[in-house]
Amino acid sequence: MTKVAPSPKRKALSINLDSNIYGTFSEIGAGQEVVRHFFRAGGASGTIAKAMSAYDKDFSDAIYGKEKTRQYVCESRLKTMIRHEYRLMEERLNRDNHPNTKFFSYANTCATVSYDKSHKGHGWMGIRYQLDAATPPNEIVLHFNLKDVDASQQQEVIGLLGLNVIYACYNYYDPVEMVLSLYDNLDRDRLEIDMINIDGPDFLDVDNRLLSLQLVKNGMTDVVMFGPDGHNLHPSEVLYKKNILALRGSFRPVTKVNLDMLENGFKKFIVEPRVEESNVIKLFEITLNNLKASGDIDEQDFLDRAELMCSMGYTVLISNYQMYFRLIEYFSKYTKARLGLIIGVNSVDDIFNEKYYRNLNGGILEAFGILFTRDLKMYLYPFQENKDQPLMNSKNIRVHPRMKPLYDYLITNGKMVDLEEYNPEYLSIFSREVLEMIKKGEKGWEKMVPDLVAQIIKEKMLFGYDESLSIKENV
């Protein structure tokens, strides 16, 4: 039976009637849409310490200081707001007079759709709050995109989302349940939540990468990203004006082949015109389909992959873009700089398979128009199924005769190029075989992965590694 979400008024009233919840509201860019719910519900005098709109930039700077980027709708501004206001709560209210009061500071900084519709609405939202008056606060920060075409409708969404965030803090203690509740009384075609981090003493065991997975898995967004520290990132903060070099794979686990692909692709990429080595961001990209390799998504399997890649210092992107042109289209939202994709040459046949583009009015030509009008280079890593089979590269790859002229054009014009400095010894390494060896406790898999990967797998018991099985195998 589907759980029915409480109405917005009921949510706001339940917070207002809790005499131990008390805090501030600071909203920039879209009026006082969140606090309005609490005022309208009644009983707000015991909940709202202060409500303000630091809308004017000069006043906002006077209160919170200037951002180095001079941006106002950004993560750093949002964090400054909630931390500044929470600090004021602690300074101005004597704890002796409020021994049971759980403080909070809520804030958002948003930009609704522009009058000429050229800029779509988006924003940052967050809250710093206590679940117990005697403990330090938790912190939730999220980014969202607004899909309505009217500013007043977008303001309505902001109000409901903010209300859901505050209600979730005090009523749901499972992080996944909290995330799912953010869409209460909201349609997903009106709102995209594409990043969320939850931190604090009550969430020490929470892995924010799993929350990212929930966003993609439940259709809240198509792309999420996290850094080497395991913290979720927003692409706009990482990809802006960057030369992006992406490697797609299952990374189950990362093998010597994966690193050879990345290292060779990187060497080729940084000598390209319009590419600066210091401006390159390297991404390991996993599609949702790759995460479903064994049927439904296995969260532990996902965490094992994430743990491995993060421990090696890589930034990871999870996408719901099975087709490459969608990924490139997404990157183009944040950068006009040259892009690079590294793929196994055995994947080229899929790229030129027309059946994947039947839902496009322009078919495969529309997809390739997006791919190669975005200043993209595609690097092809050779493939050899076994030593008895010929080595496959751009010169002998099988392409349907109808697609051959398009393929030849891309090769001739340097849009697709071979990676030639590969290590031949790595061509016989396949992730699926390494994974099976690890699970069965067979010896020899360590030679197929980088030394650091083998060390991490053993230390953290990833991918079903069991030391006792290895001991038995050796005996």
Image (spheres, rainbow, N blue to C red):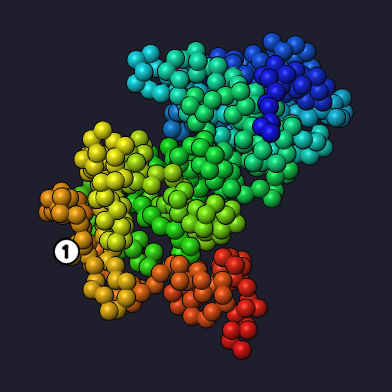
Left or right for 151, reference 37: left
Q: Where is residue 394 in the image (x, y as percent from the top left)?
A: 20, 61
How many marks the image carries: the answer is 1
User: Where is mark 1, residue-wise?
Assistant: 395
Q: Position of residue 364 (x, y in %)?
A: 24, 42
Camera-side residue of 355 and 39: 355
The residue located at (41%, 23%) in the rendering is 120
Quick one: label 1, few (<14), some, or many (20+) residues within 10 Å?
Answer: few
Q: In which quarter of the image is residue 457?
A: bottom right
The residue located at (48%, 57%) in the rendering is 293
Please say if 76 is above or below 58. below
Left or right for 381, reference 188: left
Residue 270 visible in the displayed image: no
Q: In which quarter of the image is residue 302?
A: bottom right
Quarter of the picture holding the N terminus: top right
Q: Position of residue 345 (x, y in %)?
A: 27, 61
Residue 434 visible in the displayed image: yes
Q: Residue furthest bottom?
A: 475
Q: Quadrant of residue 62?
A: top right
User: What element does badge 1 sit on?
Assistant: loop
Camera-side residue of 403 and 148: 403
Please say if 439 is above or below 57. below
The residue located at (24%, 50%) in the rendering is 352
Quarter of the picture holding the C terminus: bottom right
Please say if 267 is above or below 9. below
Q: Position of residue 83 (x, y in %)?
A: 64, 32
Camera-side residue of 318 and 130: 318
Left or right for 86, reference 293: right
The kind of residue on which mark 1 rests is Lys
The residue located at (56%, 75%) in the rendering is 440
